Amino acid sequence: MRLEDLNYFLAVADTGHVGRAADKLGQTQPALTKGIQRLENELKLQLFERTPKGMVLTTVGRTFYERAHSVQLGLNEAVREAQDLHLGAIGLLRVGLPPNYADYFASACELLLRQRPAARVQVTLGLNDMLFSALRNGDLDLCISGQHNAANPDFEQQPLFDDDLRIVAREGHPFFFRNPLRFAALAEAAWILPSNKIVARRWVDARFLEHGLPTPHVVVESSSSSVSLIRMVRSSDLLTIATESSLRQPECKGLRPIPLREAAWRRVVGITTRRGAYLSPLAQRFIDLLHQHKPVDLLRNDIDG
């Protein structure tokens, strides 16, 4: 079996189209078509259904894809490990994190680069669902994020610090003057929230349903962190969610948590890696730095490497 044929197969399976896969790989369409044919002939299996709209994996093709993708990840990691052994501490670190932990990451990264000046770092900003998908696909070495997938067999997780999620409103919001304030009152409000594909949004919806209430009336829905829309909350009676660390940032000045036990969720932030994946010496050193320093320490202190 030719390695390039396996790569052709994976690219066509990912894109669903020979032309797009050829563009992705920088190859010609006839080369990919012949490679797929060679692979199917060698396996004596039909891996794709050819349709007018593109290439669709057969049932056996889907099973083969899952195995072949794992093989490709393992091979890529073997190459990286060999390069690391040759180059020592020099290498590439790929980290994913939500935007609200960018300062924490930047401080840790600064320490790392002081100790490993020849290293390179790639940063991907996004919310957990997107980051975990990239981690699973081998596009990231690790994520710094809320740990919502502790039972997921694909991942290994190491806690770093607590950063609870709170429902927040502007100072002076009428809810702060209600005595007593009941959770049911929050169903009266309009909200800014991330989409229901995001774990934090699902937590909020579930809490309302637990209380026999309709899910929040969302007037602004964002695919990114709602902190980026925080100005709208400060100047209106809209509610949103924010982490406790975000509330200490300048952009969240003027916001207060709703003082209800039901308006908070315990949340642990930590390091997530793909189970069994190769971690380079550079990644391991970065993980050590994250464990050694809390976020506030990383803003103030330096260490010897």
Image: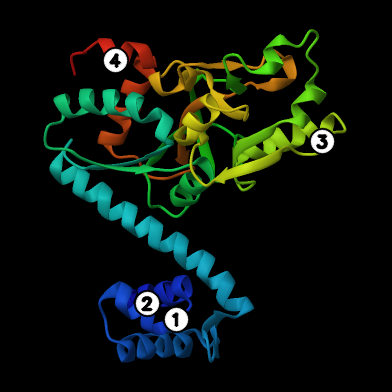
Residue 171: x, y in percent? 57, 14
Q: CA distance from mark 3 to mark 1?
A: 42 Å
Which residue lies under the disc numbered 3? 209
Sort mark 3 into few (<14), some (14-19) or many (20+) by Cα contacts within 10 Å: few
Sort mark 1 into few (<14), some (14-19) or many (20+) by Cα contacts within 10 Å: some
CB contact under 8 Å: marks 1 and 2: yes
Q: Is residue 144 above or below residue 76?
A: above
Image quadrant occupied by the C terminus: top left
Residue type beneath disc 3 = Leu
Residue 46: x, y in percent? 55, 87
Is residue 199 shown left or right of residue 272? right
Q: CA distance from mark 4 to mark 1?
A: 48 Å
- Give the mark nearest the N terminus, 4 or 3: 3
Sort mark 2 into few (<14), some (14-19) or many (20+) by Cα contacts within 10 Å: many
Q: CA distance from mark 4 to mark 2?
A: 44 Å
- Which residue is rendered at x = 38% and y = 89% of the image? 33
- Give the mark nearest the N terminus, 4 or 2: 2
Residue type beneath disc 2 = Ala
Q: Secondary structure at mark 1?
A: loop
Q: Secondary structure at mark 2?
A: helix
Which residue lies under the disc numbered 2? 21
Q: Quadrant of residue 277?
A: top left
Is residue 159 shown left or right of residue 287? right
Which residue lies under the disc numbered 1? 17
Q: CA distance from mark 4 to mark 3?
A: 40 Å
CB contact under 8 Å: marks 4 and 1: no
* Residue 151 visible in the picture: no
Which residue lies under the disc numbered 4? 299
Q: Is residue 121 above or below residue 271?
A: below
